[in-house]
Image (tube, grey):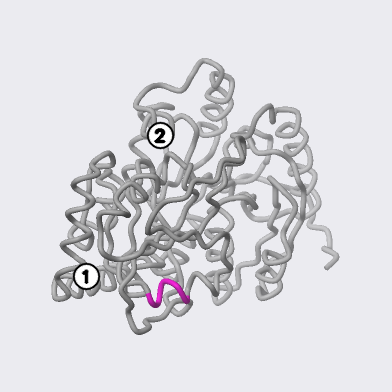
Amino acid sequence: MTTDTVGGVWTYSLELIRAMAPHHVHFYLATMGAAITLQQRQELTALSNVTVYESEYQLEWMDYPWDDVDAAGEWLLELSRELNPDLIHLNNFCHGQLPWNKPVLMVIHSCVQTWWRAVKNEKAPAGRDYYFERVREGLHAADVVVAPTQAMLTEAEAVYGTFSQKQVINNGRDPHAFRFGRKEPFIFSMGRVWDEAKNIALLTQVADAVDWPIYIAGDATHPATGENKLFKNVHFLGKLSQREISDWLSRASLYVLPAKYEPFGLSILEAAFSGCALVLGKIDSLKEVWDRSAEFVETNDVEGLTAILQKLIDDEFLRNIMACRAVKKAQDYTAALMAQEYLQAYADLPKRVNTKKAKPVET
């Protein structure tokens, strides 16, 4: 399995690996994007069914990554020859067309092209044409393409063409990693304030008009400009550990993410398991996942978001109803259910002939 150390794919990968342990599935995890952090290394140490192979190769969505992407492909093929796995699970696109001689499952977590369409409401610029070609080639070379929602799958096929074999497998989290606490009068969110997809900026625009303070986990400093904006009634908490996030969610009454682009939304699921009432961006993927278990707002509607938040602040009964709905709906997205579906997807992959004898693996 390939994974990305700098985004939500890391959380997804470790959750899936952990959930597969009772099924005696062992993963050889190839990391890319950046060096593994101390916190990530501690997370890996707690897993019994993974062997890690580290790299810092750039990812396909980064600037000028192609030499690294090609070098990573050679590295991954060498690992495959050495380890002789039963199948290849790719969480990136541009290595799908490599001569694996193994069945390949590829997951669309997000991509530049669909991001651009959702956030900018236009096609990605011509400078991304080579990315488009490489991603399309990788996707259509995979034996099966998996997406976490039907909305994400539909968007991907609108951009890259219809996939011959495809499947929706919802992401999942372990509900035991989150807990209910005594709910306190504040609003919580997670994301970088400058991230156009998460659209946290809309939440900061309404902060002065609602009665409760807003706490945001994530970086408030723009990486390119160094700009650090301050907003009345908004408290930025910086990057938090998973334990700290769980604590904040356990106490938060409302979780708000007015996202313009969110193919699934693991942070929302974490909030639901923690008993938060949800206020989300009115986009197809989030409506698909949460249906009547969340309040939805247009992603550019400042007045609408203000009204919804104040309504939930003022009405404890409604707030509790929405929190209960979110908790109940979250049970559809557990890590155990995700693991069962991936087990079946693995079993359904077409077998490819491989006469190479397995080598012993050093641990």
Task: Say whether residue 93 is left or right of residue 275.
Answer: right
Q: Earlier in the sequence, mark 1 or mark 2?
A: 2
Residue at 32%, 49% (x, y): give it. Answer: 258
Identify which residue is drawn at 70% across, 28% down.
Answer: 66
Farthest bottom residue?
182
Number of marks in picture = 2
Side of 143 relative to 271 (left or right): right
Residue sitting at the far front: 232
The quarter of the picture where residue 290 lies is bottom left
Residue extent of the magenta highlight: 247-251
- Residue 103 placement (x, y as % from top left): 59, 46
Can you tell which mark lies on residue 272?
Answer: none
Please report the residue visible at 31 percent of the width from the left and 67 percent of the height from the top: 332
**Percent from the top left, x then y, of residue 249?**
41, 71
Q: Taking 68 as reference, is 286 left or right? A: left
Mark 2 sits on what residue? 156
User: Looking at the figure, which quarter contains the C terminus?
Assistant: bottom right
Nearest the viewer among 202 and 60 is 202
Tag 1's secondary structure? helix
